[in-house]
Image (spheres, grey):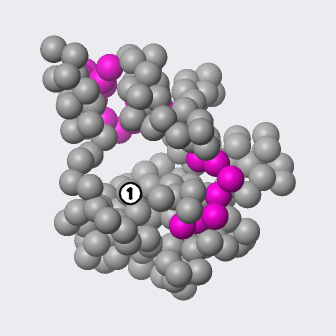
Amino acid sequence: MALKHLNLDRVWWLVSPGNPIKSHDHLADLSARLEQAEQISQHKHIEITGFEASLPTNYTAQTLKFLKRRYKGVHFVWLMGADNLVTFHTWQHWQDIFKTMPIAVFDRPGYHLKAMASPAAHKFKQFQINQFAAKRLATKPAPAWSYLTHKLSPLSSTQLRQAEKNLKS
């Protein structure tokens, strides 16, 4: 979906070493989550990586700044679900994320109204690009973002991991 609607060459699926604001008590180790992502993705233009574990931070703002410095001239777009936009204003340096690279927000079941009413959506409303113009999002200077509606799946990443775990049991 992201490849087509945003006219991207490829997607890097960054498997996080762990959300710094969530408990890691029940989080599978990084290698297991990388393997799960590989099994779920299976697309030649989606690259699964856990490189963030090698960085001196696990905060998104610093990771994105690292990518922009390391890969000068590459047009990045940060992809996230609408469920994350609802609480995005609680992320460390969330405004810097908007100012670092364009953002594509993908609709999630039950989150459209909450996401669009979120503090982040209001703060950056003037930089929102219509989803029908999102094919040009990657070449827009930040801040720029688009909210993309599509056929919705009710599964969260947690549910996908649980389903995979149940299959192996």
Locate the C terminus and report the quarter of the image it occupies: top left
Q: Position of residue 131 (x, y in %)?
A: 50, 78
Is 18 inside the magenta-drawn segment?
A: yes
Q: Nearer the viewer, residue 60 or 161?
A: 161
Above or below, comparing residue 15 to residue 88 in the picture? above
**Residue 144 at x, y percent in the picture:** 60, 72
Identify which residue is drawn at 52% across, 58% down: 2
The quadrant where residue 81 appears: bottom left
Picture coordinates of residue 5 (x, y %)?
A: 54, 67
Residue 97 appears anywhere in the view: no
- Residue 78 visible from this viewpoint: yes
Front residue of 28 and 62: 28
Q: Main secondary structure of the magenta part?
A: loop
Residue 61 in the image: state x and y as whole percent. Answer: 57, 48
Q: Residue at x 34, y 76 (%)?
A: 116
Magenta stretch contains residue 113: no
Q: Residue at x 28, y 72 (%)?
A: 112
Q: Quadrant of residue 133?
A: bottom right
Looking at the rendered structure, the kind of residue marked 1 is Gly
Q: Which residue is mark 1?
A: 81
Counting other residues with Cα less than 10 Å from the Cα at mark 1, is it few (<14), some (14-19), or many (20 or more)? Answer: some
Judge from the rendering whether residue 115 lies leftward or rightward of residue 101; answer left or right. Answer: left
* Magenta segment boundaries in residue numbering: 5-28
From this view, report whether residue 80 is shown above or below residue 160. below
Q: Secondary structure at mark 1?
A: strand
Q: Is residue 22 left or right of residue 51?
A: left
Task: Give me the residue at 36% from left, 68% from top.
Answer: 150
In the visual, does 161 lie left or right of 77? left
